[in-house]
Amino acid sequence: MPTYEYKCCECEYVYEVFHKISQEPLKECPKCHKETLQRGIGGQNAVLNFKGSGFYITDYTNQSASAPKAEKKDSKKTSK
């Protein structure tokens, strides 16, 4: 779950909230109680953690584009 930074456009109050990506953004400022919040991603200490076996450049490449193309041989014989 990412950390989102919220800033109130009215009173300029800035704070961070840790919640799911799928969760609706907050709208009401906890300080002035007006619905003028803007959401940003992460704060000054934002960290992105990848969990699992790993992420490699080859995981997302187009396999057919990187495979060498076989030369086409002309089946017609030329006679002199």
Image: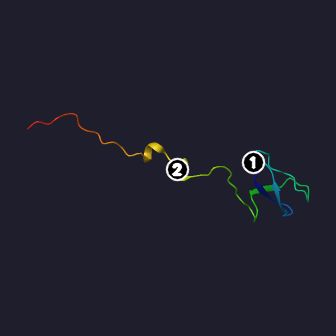
Disc 1 to disc 2, C-alpha distance: 27 Å
Q: Which colour assignment does the render follow?
A: rainbow
> Viewed as shown, does residue 33 lie left or right of 4?
right
Question: Residue lying farthest top?
Answer: 76
Alpha-carbon neighbours of circle 1 within 10 Å: few (<14), some, or many (≥20)?
Answer: few
- Which quadrant holds residue 49? bottom right
Q: Is residue 51 positioned above or below 8 on the image?
A: above
Residues under numbered marks 1 and 2 in contact, where contact means CB atoms less than 8 Å apart = no
In the rendering, at what x and y percent does residue 61 appear? 51, 48
Q: Residue at x 76, y 51 (%)?
A: 1
Q: Residue at x 75, y 48 (%)?
A: 21
Decide which of 53, 67 is in the foreground and name it.
Answer: 53
Count up the numbered dots.
2
In the rendering, at what x and y percent does residue 62 appear? 49, 45
User: Is label 1 or label 2 in front?
Assistant: 2
Looking at the rendered structure, the kind of residue marked 1 is Ile
Q: Residue at x 80, y 50 (%)?
A: 19
Nearer-N-terminus badge (1/2): 1
In the rendering, at what x and y percent does residue 53 appear? 63, 50
> Which residue does the numbered mark 2 point to in the structure image?
58
Q: Secondary structure at mark 1?
A: loop
> Which residue does the numbered mark 1 point to in the structure image?
21
Alpha-carbon neighbours of circle 2 within 10 Å: few (<14), some, or many (≥20)?
Answer: few
Say which quadrant the C terminus sits in.
Answer: top left
Looking at the rendered structure, the kind of residue marked 2 is Thr
Question: Residue lying farthest left?
Answer: 80
Decide which of 10, 1 is in the foreground and name it.
Answer: 1
In the rendering, at what x and y percent does residue 31 appear? 91, 60
Q: Residue at x 75, y 64 (%)?
A: 45
> Viewed as shown, does residue 79 lie left or right of 52?
left
Q: Is residue 15 positioned above or below 1 on the image?
A: below
